[in-house]
Image: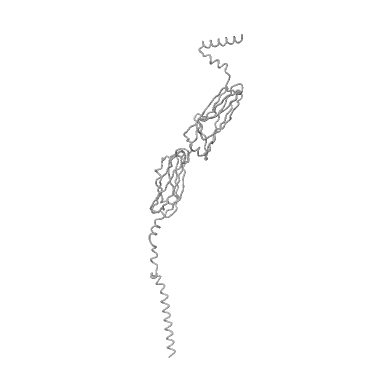
Amino acid sequence: MKMMLRRSMLLLTTALLLVGLGLPPTVVAQDQFEAPSWTLGWSTDMDNGYTVTLDDDWDIEGEVVAYVENTRMSQVQLDLTYDVNSWVPWSIDGPESITVAAGENKSITLTLSTGVDDDAVREYNPDNTSTISIMADEKVGETSAGNQEIDGTVKLPKVFNLRPEITPSNDELHAGSSVMISMQMVNLGNANDAVKEATAQVRSCPHLTVDGLDALENTVVEPTGARNGKDSFATLTLVASESQPRRTCEVTISLVSEGDNAARSVTFDVEVFAYEEEQQSNSGDPSDEDEGPDSGLSVESNTLPGFFAVEAIAMIAAGGLLRRKKTEM
């Protein structure tokens, strides 16, 4: 009883002294009597959020790391739970509990992986941000002795994949004429994209051109087949000059994406029919007019051998008559 009285008097004296010095007694009391604690924090830099990775098959991969620092003189046992504030196309995998020894700093690794099918991943808008939370609850037996919580932003990257698709014309292309073809600008990414540049390359046909590409620049293309994106089509014109000979031309159409600055292309063949062939098909072959039984030198050359043959027979017959007359005489 005397010990408790002395301790109370000491605390009261200390408090009065601190008040006289202008210091709040509770601060010093906590510093003197509060046991060292533990801290939950991020090892991964989450200041600007964490962006998972996406491969070509729309598979998600990611890993974030937290830590627990125990400054006590005894170990701490924590139960861990994880949460996300909205629907996301990935799942979280991490330990359910952790034991941190006295004076130890221990890591908590969370693995982020695909939690839905590929189409659902592409449907997720990369402009969205989601908050992931880690809650650590200290357990002493079955009793909760305190808890801490940290959170951070996790994002999905934007994927750009802009490419052209061509629907060939059913009309024939003749020299001196043109045909129209349909081109769809297909966005196989997960974010809006735009045409930075559209070009055409023609092989084997120097007199064939593609018109209508300049008008495609800065055209915004929404994701094709995702998030109710609208399809984007354009009409191009293939023009063959009159000097273009008959030939199968190789045409390549390229689109440069504004999102990733990559050029993707499609190549197709176009057969051009020559202008001369069309003219000849509308008129007969002039060489046919020179052929026939009464045509010039060919007939004349055929009659000469017959003339000499008749003359030879006549001479033989005359010679025979002369011999006969001499015999009779």
Query: Residue 303's spot in the image, x, y percent?
Result: 40, 74
Quadrant location of the N terminus?
top right
Rendered view: 167 above or below 49: below
Horizontal arrangement in the rendering, residue 68 relative to residue 272 (left or right): right
Render colour scheme: one colour
Rendered view: 141 above or below 250: above
User: Residue 4 versus residue 200: which sits nearer the camera?
Assistant: 4
Query: Residue 302's spot in the image, x, y percent?
Result: 41, 73
Query: Residue 48's spot in the image, x, y percent?
Result: 49, 30
How many marks the image carries: the answer is 0
Q: Residue furthest top?
A: 2
Query: Residue 301's spot in the image, x, y percent?
Result: 41, 72
Q: Residue furthest bottom?
A: 329
Q: Residue furthest front?
A: 142
The answer to which image quadrant residue 82 occupies is: top right
Rendered view: 108 above or below 176: above
Quadrant location of the C terminus?
bottom left
